[in-house]
Image: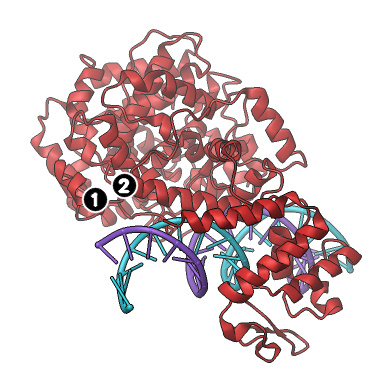
Chain colours: A red, B cyan, C purple
Amino acid sequence: MANSRLLSVCVNRRIDGELGFQESNVLKMNRTTDDSDNAMVPKDQVDSPSNEGSSGGLLTGGGQVLKKGPWTSAEDAILVDYVKKHGEGNWNAVQKHSGLSRCGKSCRLRWANHLRPNLKKGAFTPEEEKLIIELHARMGNKWARMAAHLPGRTDNEIKNYWNTRIKRRQRAGLPLYTSNVPFQASSENQQSQTATAYGNGEKRPNELLQGNSFDFPDAIFDSFNANHGALSYAPPFSDISVSSMLSQGFGSQNYGFMNPMGNHVKQFRESETSLPGFHGSVTTGLPPLEQFSNEPSEKIQRSFGLGYPYDPDPSSKDLAPFGGAVPGSHALSNGNFSASRPLGGTVKMELPSLQYPESDLSSWLACSSPPPEAIDNYIQSPPATASVQSECVSPRNSGLLDALLHEAQARKTQSSGKRSSSSVVAPGGMVESSGLNFCEAAWKEYNDPISPLGRPAASVFNECTPPVSGGSLDELQPSKEPSDIMLAAAEHVSTPNVGERDISPCSDFLRPDALLGGSDWLENSQTAKEHSTLNDAIATLLGEDLCSEYKEVPAGTSSTLSQGLGLDSCPWNNMPRACQMS
DNA sequence: AAGAGTTACAACCGCAAGCGT
DNA sequence: AACGCTTGCGGTTGTAACTCT
């Protein structure tokens, strides 16, 4: 592999990082010369002042061409000299005052990532790696914030490391998060981190959704760690960044193999806010949406997944999440509960270079009890691993619509008397499949009266995570009828400390029909019209047949569910108002 | 030996927030 | 309030070195 090269680079950088500013810069320049001037830079871009700007440079206002591409040692020296004299900031003045043919942006980046003192170069130490993993689990792709926790490291460095790590582990079929990663860092640790990184009123990524005292992601991890070993069918969720996905929100990019969980956690996270019962039962009984009220709408959009796939018109941003233009239609406007969401979540945002348009968690549906390793592979491996897929009939082989069709077919074939199972096979099945384990993990937590997660969180898990494939499902919910489940959920939401109830995941809740069709609470809401519109949109996306298929949901399921979720008893209608404020 | 694939890194780009005018 | 500027962030791309076939 590239270990030898990496090693040599690391050695150089290690030396580099141990030196002071002056020596470091000398070495940096040397290295820059080595790496950039001779390696990274096309020959026609270096050592040839006459060619400066030939690499796609921009013309400044004064007609000077701004150079692009790798920096030369001379440029570095100029920049360093400038910063020494004038300090950081006002980067656009660098070009004016120093004659450097670089835009301020580029100068800032060069300084921040390479030239500034105290930069720690070299390979990440195991401690740093561990911290990065932990931070990523906590923060998601918040590289700059992660860098704040790693002195001497830059966001770019961390980002590159992470992406490389992902690719590597993906290929190796290794878990992204090793099981020994202490996801459940102490609350005070997190708080201290928060104080450090966000001391200037900066909102941490989860802050939008973590306005209460719940250390939610950590609790989730505790739950996972405590439970996943007992679940033969459960993937090693400790290996999956749950909280990272929690923190990433819809707008952030989830790597493809993480999407299943990512979507699911997104659902959960959104449920955290969209389900009044969650917070309401814990704190004030009011959904803590005040925290959103001051957020710019775009930010909220990001956090709540604007542009969810059901939006037939991605440009229709007036379909604000969380009920912006669909007041009252929380489930819809959240874009979530969306197990029904076609995989990939937001069409554009969730297909970064490292993503795969499909991962294969849907195959879980066909494999009732894959070994954890297999599941892990499902998560980690790109869909190209046909051999893996072939082991289980994956409805996703031919894409989302095929998957939907497949699942619709599965719904047909599955007994109508097994409604809960039929609901298992929902659009975006792989999301649900991940959710099973998620749910299961939370299940015990839920049943733990002193769970740090608390009932509400678990209940939300359950409410938002449908059961997965048949066998497992039956094992999970041996005898509960959906109605019972919903009733139990209702009590669940409204009575915070009922810990012994066996509450089934609200399987139907995630389905389009649950969200859009036959929904009494929706029909009774002010947003029936919008609901109808969105329903049509979904119909367009999924096809009328599918939509009608999903409309075969037992009557009252959704409404029951809404009751179960406390939609009636909780100040549900307040939520959109809070968002409308933004 | 040659081409394809992978890795690590640097840098760019677009977007958005913050701030001052 | 509107506008422009600066800064920061996250995603993406480009490239050389390296490895594999």
Q: Position of residue A228 (x, y in %)?
A: 36, 23
Residue A146 in the image: above or below residue A30: above
Q: Secondary structure at mark 2?
A: loop
Residue A475 as seen in the image, left or right of residue A444: left
Q: Which residue is mark 1?
A: A385
| Residue A251 appearing in the image | no
Please, which chain is the residue tagged with disc 1 on? A
Res A540 label = none
> Residue A394 or B20: which is nearer the viewer?
A394
* Residue at (42% x, 45% y) in the render: A335
Residue A171 as seen in the image, left or right of residue A412: right
Residue A298 as seen in the image, left or right of residue A334: right
Instruction: Return the residue found at the far right.
Output: A85
Question: The residue under label 2 is which amino acid type?
Answer: Ser
* Residue at (63% x, 70% y) in the render: A34
Q: Secondary structure at mark 1?
A: loop
Residue A325 in the image: above or below residue A574: below
Q: Position of residue A6 (x, y in %)?
A: 52, 55
| Residue A452 appearing in the image | yes
- Marks 2/1 in contact by CB < 8 Å: the verdict is yes
The alpha-carbon separation of the residues under discs 2 and 1 comes to 7 Å
Q: Quadrant of residue A100?
A: bottom right
Res A381 label = 2
Q: Quadrant of residue A187?
A: top right
> Residue A226 or A35: which is nearer the viewer?
A35
Q: Position of residue A136 (x, y in %)?
A: 54, 41
